[in-house]
Every structure is written in C-alpha cells, then in structure tokens.
Image: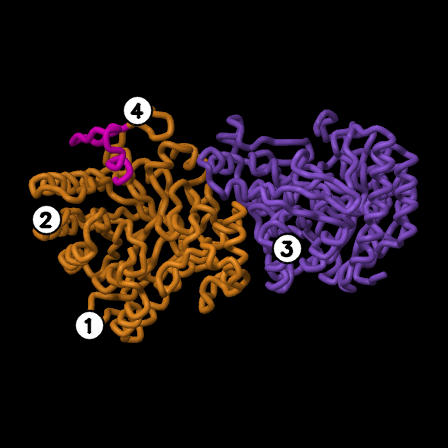
Chain colours: A orange, B purple
C-alpha cells in the first residue's frame, strides 16, 4: 500500500461516531471533517484557486469522466498534472467517472469489463473500465483517486443490488492492480444499496483489500434521509478507524452534521455552488433566496454573522441587483458565501468535537435549521 | 467651482501633446494617462473590486442610464452612495446617460427640455434632462459626473451638428446650475461632430464655463480613425492645460497611444472586457483569440511578458479548456488579462513620457501592433 494518504485521528467523540482528524496528502494536510468543493471540469465553478484557498478549502474534487472527455487526461498530464493545469496547490480528489457514466442511462452499456458509453459532448463512442479509470486518474495526478464502481440506484431489487455490489468489489481489485503511482492514494468505495447485509458485505470485502481510505457510495440517490443515516450506521463502524471515510455526493448542512455524527470525515456535493448560481444562499436558518424581491432594499449582508468576502463587503440589495442585471459578480459572491458557509460549518463542528460538545453543537444546529429543508 | 477634482501636471512631452499627471479625487489620486475599466451596472463585468485594485485601476466608470433604471439611484443613495454600494473605494466617474438614451433610436424623443425614452428593461416611460441626470449623479455620489450632452452621430450634416453642439452647451450650463455637491467634480463635454470649427466653438464655450475637467465626446462613433485624431488635434489644444481631458468610449491600444500623443489624460471603453468574455485577449502583437483550436495544447501563458494573475498562473490550453467547457473562470481570466494589459500599457506609456522618450515608445508600439486591427 501507498503511504501517500495518511489519516491522523485527533479526537474521537465519546458519545457518537464523530471524530476530528487531519488528512495528510502529497499536497498538504487538511483538517477533517472537511467539505470538498466540486471542480468538475478542472475549476470550481466561478471560483479562482486563490478564493478557495482563502476560504479554507484544503481539498477539492474533480471529475475523471469530464476531464477524460475534455480536455483529455493526456493534455493534463503534459501540463504537469491537474494541480499545475488548474493552478491549485492543495489536495485534489478525483472520482472515477463511474457515477457519471451510470447516470447516462440509455447512452451506456455495462459489462463485466467496463462501461461503453457515448460522450455527452459529441456523441463519440467511449469506454471506461477499472483499469482505464485508474490510468486516467494516474495521469491526472490527483492526491486521492477513487475506484471505478457501480452505483446501485434507488430503489433496487435485492438480487440486482447484490450482484452489482459484488462487481464493485471485483472492480476495486482490478483498480488496485492497475494503480501505478506511489504518490497517490486509491480509495475503495463501499456500495450495497439500501440493504444492511450488503453494506456489511461490501465493507468487509473492501477493507480486506486495505485501501488508504474508503468512499461510501450509493447514498443520497433519492432515498429518504433516515434511510441514508441507517445505512451509514451499518457502514462506518465496519471501516477501520485509522482510515478516512468519505460520504460521496452529500453537501447540505443537515446531512453533514448527521454524517459526521456517524463517523464520516469527508463530503462533497455540487449543491452549494449550483444553488448559489441560481441566487440561493445558505444560512444557519436554511436557505435565503437573495435574488427575491423582498431583498431589493435590504442593506444587510446575506448573513450578518458570516466572515466571508461577500458578507464582509456587500449587501443583499447589491447582490440581488447583480442577479437581476445578469452580472457574473453576483453568482461569484453567492458561491463564495455558500462554500465559506459550509467550510466554516465544518470548522465549527470540528472544534465542537475537540471540545467534547458535539452533541450540544448538533442540538443547537437543529434549533435553527428548518426540518423540512433538503 | 468645486475643488473636488484637481489635476497635477507632472511632465509635458517636449515633442507632442502627451503629458503625465496625477488626478486627485475625493477617493484617492491616480496617475494619468489612465484607462478606466467600465462598470456599467455598478460592477465591472466578471471582476471583483479587489481584482481591480490589484491590477492598478485608480478609477472606474459607471452608467447613470443603467443605474437610474436599475436598481435606481435612490437605493444607491440609501446604501451610502455608489462606492459603498459596490464596495469600491477608489475613484468613480459616471457618465450622464446622454449617450445611452440617444442610442435608443426610435425609443427616445429629444426636446430642448431633455430626452423622453422607454426603458430597455421594461418599456416604461422615462425622462432624463440636464437637471435630472445631474441630480441622479449627485445621488450616486461619483467623484466625477459628466454633463448631460447630445452626442452628434456620424455622419451628420453641418447644420444638425451645429444646432446639436450648441444645445450641448446650453445643457452644460443647466447641469452646472443643478449640480449641488462640493465633493464631486462636474465635467463638461466637448462635441462638434467632425467639424473643426464646431469643435473649436464647443471647446471655447465649455471652457468659458470653467469645468474642473473636460470630456471629448462624439468620437469613436464610426468615423475613420484619422478623422478622430484630426478632431482631437483641433480640440485638446483649446482646453486648459491645468484640467484633465477625457476621450470618451476609446479603449484599443492604438487609439490610446494616439490619443495620449494628442494630449488626452483619461479613456474608457467596454472593448477590453467585452472581447475578453468572447475569448479574445489583447497583446502587444494585437489580438490573440485564446479559445481558438490552435491553442488547445499551448502551455504558454497568454502573454509570457505579462505580469497579470492569468498569465502568472495559467496556460492558454487551460483557459481555452475553460471557454470550451463554458466555465466562468475562463472569462474572469481573460478579463483580468485585458484590463491589466491596458492599465500596464498606460503605466509604461506614462513612464516613457516622464523619461522623455514618448515618441520612441510610440514607434516601438507600432512595430508590433498590426496596422489593420481595430
């Protein structure tokens, strides 16, 4: 196994699974639990690397599927790797492309070998397999690469979920064999759909392969949240305590706090950046749609308690004006705010874990956060 | 007259009209000749105030017409003025809205009193006059406000140009009377179309009103460049040497160097920001369309000699990728580059004036710059 990625446990909550740690990568160390902003196409939409650094992002996520198709991993490798290509000197995690190709529906065909699909850009025939997805990620040079897995949809019959989950294990082994760089860490991904025994089986099979970290996949795919939390409770306790756990595709504050409580260290989601571009901002009281008419003359910042560049310098009225006028700076500001909000939320949650008051933190969170929000 | 705006001459070129100076405003001083980035709707498109500060912009331009219609000058005043509203603490010049309402064609009707027009946003009936345009700019709180003028179109008959130019003088007097703030400087605008005697008449009439600075309007409206230069030569020598001269709507490097040679101190244009958003960048060799296929694998910066954030950190291949992938960060980078390029061009030109080598600077410029470029 590679030592590229090393998890350092700082504090284990005495009452829950929550834990504070540090993840060491070839591009620096970052505190966990951590939210990873998503930079699908080698850029976190509307952000500069400097803005991400300033808001405290220690690692971002980028997408193998997208970079494989455009601009191509060969070009990225020629440019000196993804870090250099996109001007980002901290951690990068790349997903394997598995989730994206499965999402193509009729445009893809799955076999034991891999997935044949048509590019969403030009319709060209393409193929990704555990080996190819790993080689592509080796070329990209991310600090953490993810195994090429099959994401069990929701709902799924038990038999399908079992066959799919077992294939994910076989593919994980193939990824391990294909993985060729000691300066990158390959994470396995636990699947198992919404079946407790399959989650247990997947966790057991993958941990036996001894990855330096584990993704938890196939959650936040349309199931009720209580079911996601239940599956987490059947997964994280089966993962080694000296390795990081990454809950894939989750990025609303409620799921972050509930995920952390169940032992998750890393999260990613397009949610904060996507809704920001539509004029929706995140606050401790839930969403604030700053482009709405009610904020037209509101000279307060989005969140008076927030330390982000947007809240320190601009009013709701100004940001609303920018949205009404179709000005790019508007969505830059809401994106900065939403990412800062989540990163700061994680920082405060971590501090609460360290100070032995995580449950009180969670209780206070739920006092303000609207129960019905996504 | 107000002392809000004061021009300090640092160096007069011995061989041409070129001059280096400092313009002192209530929001700081900046070196001239200066290019002013355009922030039409209270934001320089795609830029943050911090980015503008870092690239050395000492003053930006914003538009009365647009802010009058949206979000409304009352709101901006309530927010503490335009500087505070948009988070910009250096100089702001507002144009009067005259140019925009005249550009509305069939949607506007001009009388001696002012211009009735329909909003391009919602079709509502609106009215701007010298008094209203001045009051709106007083509410916005810009450091420099412009008189409400009539821009003579090109081509125009002599009689029309004469009547229009004389109306601009009458309107300038009304603006002076309406102007109510000692912490703002009101500039008159010289018109006269492409007629030398009308330019001379306009300059004489306006300078007799003793403004703290003068716009030169009605140029760069479709006429050949040699005609613009000719008109400049009949205008700037008639303006007082202790006041700044501002050539409105001009922002390509060739016109900047030729304008400076003829005694212009300030320029503005949407050109550098507009073409940037279409993937076109400005270099000493003319335009480089970075989104073109030829740059797909080009790992050099846009301009290897440029000190801007984009050129210091990113390749043509990366920026092209961002444009192909419709990523906002791409046009942020080209906008940063183009503005930095022009601001730096002005800095170097100023240095040449100070060091008594402006003509050599101009000669070298024309060695590299393509003659046929706009």
- The part of the image, by quadrant, that contains residue B304 is top right
Q: Residues within 10 Å of mark 2 (few under 14, many from 20)?
A: many
The image's mark for residue B53 is: 3
Q: Residues within 10 Å of mark 4 (few under 14, many from 20)?
A: few
SS at mark 2? helix
Q: CA separation, marks 3 and 1?
A: 50 Å
Q: Residues within 10 Å of mark 1 (few under 14, many from 20)?
A: few
- Bounds of the magenta segment: A99-117
Q: Where is mark 1, residue-wise?
A: A15
Q: Give percent across and percent down for residue A362.
A: 27, 69
Q: Where is mark 2, residue-wise?
A: A198
SS at mark 4? strand
**In the visual, does A105 lie left or right of A345?**
left
Location of the C terminus of chain A by quadrant is bottom left
- The part of the image, by quadrant, that contains residue B15 is top right
SS at mark 1? loop
Q: Give percent across and percent down for residue B318.
A: 49, 37
**In the visual, does A335 lie left or right of A36?**
right
Q: CA separation, marks 3 and 4?
A: 48 Å
Q: Where is mark 4, residue-wise?
A: A125
SS at mark 3? helix
**Is residue A354 magenta-colored?**
no
| Marks 3 and 2 on same chain | no
Q: CA separation, marks 4 and 2?
A: 33 Å
Write down the chain letter for disc 1.
Answer: A
Do labels 3 and 2 touch, CB within 8 Å? no
Q: Give percent across and percent down for residue B7.
A: 83, 56
Q: Residue visible at 57% across and 43% down?
A: B121
Q: Residues within 10 Å of mark 3 (few under 14, many from 20)?
A: some
């Amino acid at each position: 196994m590679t030592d590229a990625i090393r998890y350092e446990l700082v504090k284990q909550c005495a009452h829950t699974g929550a834990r504070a740690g540090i993840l060491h990568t070839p591009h620096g160390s970052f505190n966990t639990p951590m939210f990873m902003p998503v930079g699908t196409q080698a850029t976190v939409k509307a952000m500069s690397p400097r803005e991400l650094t300033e808001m405290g992002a220690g690692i971002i996520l980028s997408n193998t599927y997208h970079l494989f198709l455009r601009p191509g991993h060969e070009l990225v490798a020629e440019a000196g790797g993804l870090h250099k290509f996109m001007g980002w000197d901290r951690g990068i995690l790349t997903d394997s492309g598995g989730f994206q190709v499965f999402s193509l529906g009729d445009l893809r065909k799955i076999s034991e070998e891999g997935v044949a699909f048509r590019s969403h850009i030009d319709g060209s025939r393409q193929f990704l397999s555990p080996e190819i997805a790993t080689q592509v990620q080796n070329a990209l040079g991310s600090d953490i690469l993810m195994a090429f897995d099959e994401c069990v949809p929701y709902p799924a019959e038990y038999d399908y979920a079992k066959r799919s989950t077992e294939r994910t294990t076989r593919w994980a082994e193939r990824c391990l064999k294909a993985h060729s760089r000691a300066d990158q860490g390959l994470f396995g991904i636990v699947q198992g759909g919404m079946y407790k025994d399959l989650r247990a089986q997947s966790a057991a099979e993958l941990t036996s392969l001894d990855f330096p970290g584990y993704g938890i996949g196939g959650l936040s795919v349309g199931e009720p949240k209580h079911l996601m939390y239940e599956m987490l409770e059947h997964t994280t306790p089966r993962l080694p305590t000296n390795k990081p756990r990454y809950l894939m595709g989750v990025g609303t504050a409620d799921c972050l706090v509930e995920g952390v409580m169940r032992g998750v260290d890393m999260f990613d989601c397009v949610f904060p950046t996507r809704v920001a571009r539509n004029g929706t901002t995140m606050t401790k009281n839930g969403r604030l749609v700053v482009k709405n008419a009610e904020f037209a003359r509101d000279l307060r910042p989005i969140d008076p308690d927030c330390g982000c560049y947007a809240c320190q310098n601009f009013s709701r009225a100004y940001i609303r004006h920018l949205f009404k006028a179709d000005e790019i700076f508007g969505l830059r500001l809401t994106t900065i705010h939403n990412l800062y909000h989540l990163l700061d939320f994680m920082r405060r949650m971590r501090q609460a874990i360290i100070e032995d008051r995580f449950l009180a933190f969670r209780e206070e969170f739920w006092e303000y956060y609207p129960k019905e929000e996504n």
